Image (tube, rainbow, N blue to C red):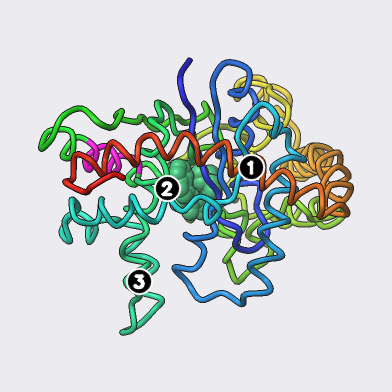
Amino acid sequence: KKIVYSGIQPSGTFTIGNYFGAMKNWVPMQEAYDCLYCVVDLHAITVPQVPADLRRRTYESLAILMAVGIDPDKSILYVQSHVPAHTELTWILNCFSYMGELSRMTQYKDKSKKQGNNIRVGLFDYPVLMAADILLYQSDLVPVGNDQKQHVELARDIASRFNQQFSPTFKLPEPYFGETGARIMSLQEPGRKMSKSDENINGFVSLLDDPDTVIRKFKRAVTDSDTEVRHDRENKPGVSNLMEIYNCTTGRSLEAIQREFEGKGYGDFKLAVGESVAETLRPIQEEYKRLLADKGYLESVMKQNAERAAKIAYKTLMKVRKKTGFINL
Ligand code: TYM
């Protein structure tokens, strides 16, 4: 069976971009593959965090992943800092990574601009930690949104460098994208990806937004001066984004969506998209509330799954230590 690995940061609320781009694809993969899904708290501290908020959001992240359908008995659903092998492998891989390749990461370039002169080493090193996550479990497939593609490729590069210098040690992972949804754009600026850190809250839809808020945000979504519901990312980025979102919620093809709204205005279209998203989120939110009320249960999931993950990670780590020249006692 192929091994699937992915992670999500417990920073802020999740958006429908996170959901359609990544989490939604994680659910069906549980049937066919051995899956590991990780709440990456070590990644979260690459930007400043309030400790109590980080702790709360880690519980919330676990609950939301379970609410969308990740089954912690089937998949290994765990918290990154509970498995120390991640940090240990990161250090070793740091010694096989180049400043040059890390400087070329577009996400680093974007994020470091916001940090002024005091750019943290952790932010720079973030992709090596992500490589360690993936490589520890000999992962085959990494289901992510488009913005993580470059990081998965870096993990491959580091892995093959290590394999070549010593002997085959790591499997080379491949990124995996859904047919649509890999790049959900802001509802206000359809040229930019939807992000939870957007200052304009109308730009993103949180998985926890109530139905009225969801519908209002879609009503306000930026489209164009045309009236035609047609998929054309280049010339009609706003409408195309809404069509892709509607495809994600209904499963209808882009052509079918175009036909459905032929001769109707954008108003009807935006309302339909908003309602379908609200309808998709309703059962997730109910389950989320139920799960979050039982912290003891969430902690038992964390503990059991960290143990399962640690066992697998340990095997890879011991091999790496040996090849690197460390003494395994
Ligand atoms: P993070 O927490 O920023 O995002 C989690 C997932 O959501 C996807 N995503 C989107 N997809 C489509 N449209 C959008 N607007 C959108 N915004 C976010 C992201 O691509 C991602 O798949 N470094 C990673 C977490 C990570 C990881 C890993 C992933 C750590 N270790 C190992 C895979 C394997 C991150 O910060 O994702």
- First in sequence, mark 3 or 2: give its number: 3
Residue at x 56%, y 58% (from the top left corner): 195
Q: Residue furthest bottom?
A: 117
- First in sequence, mark 2 or 1: give its number: 1
Membership of 153 in magenta stretch? yes
Which residue is tagged 2? 147
How would you rate the neighbour count of disc 1 (Cα within 10 Å): few for under 14, some for 14-19, many for 20 or more?
many
Where is residue 258, by image quadrant? top right
Q: Amino acid at mark 3?
A: Ser
Residue 24 is situated, as x and y percent measured from the top left of the image, at 64, 34
- Between residue 317 and residue 73, name the one nearer to us: 317
Label number found at residue 112: 3
Label number found at residue 19: 1
Residue 108 is situated, as x and y percent measured from the top left of the image, at 34, 62
Cα distance, mark 3 to mark 1? 25 Å
Say what secondary structure mark 1 lies in. Answer: helix
Up-down: is 13 above or below 289? below
35 displayed left or right of 91? right
Residue at x 34%, y 31% (from the top left corner): 173
Numbered disc total:
3
Q: Residue furthest front?
A: 329
Where is residue 281, by image quadrant? top right
| Magenta segment | 152-159
Q: Amino acid at mark 1?
A: Tyr
Q: Amino acid at mark 2?
A: Asp
Label 2 residue near ligand 1, CB within 8 Å:
yes
Q: Name the magenta segment's main secondary structure.
A: helix
Up-down: is 91 above or below 227? below
Residue 121 is situated, as x and y percent measured from the top left of the image, at 32, 71
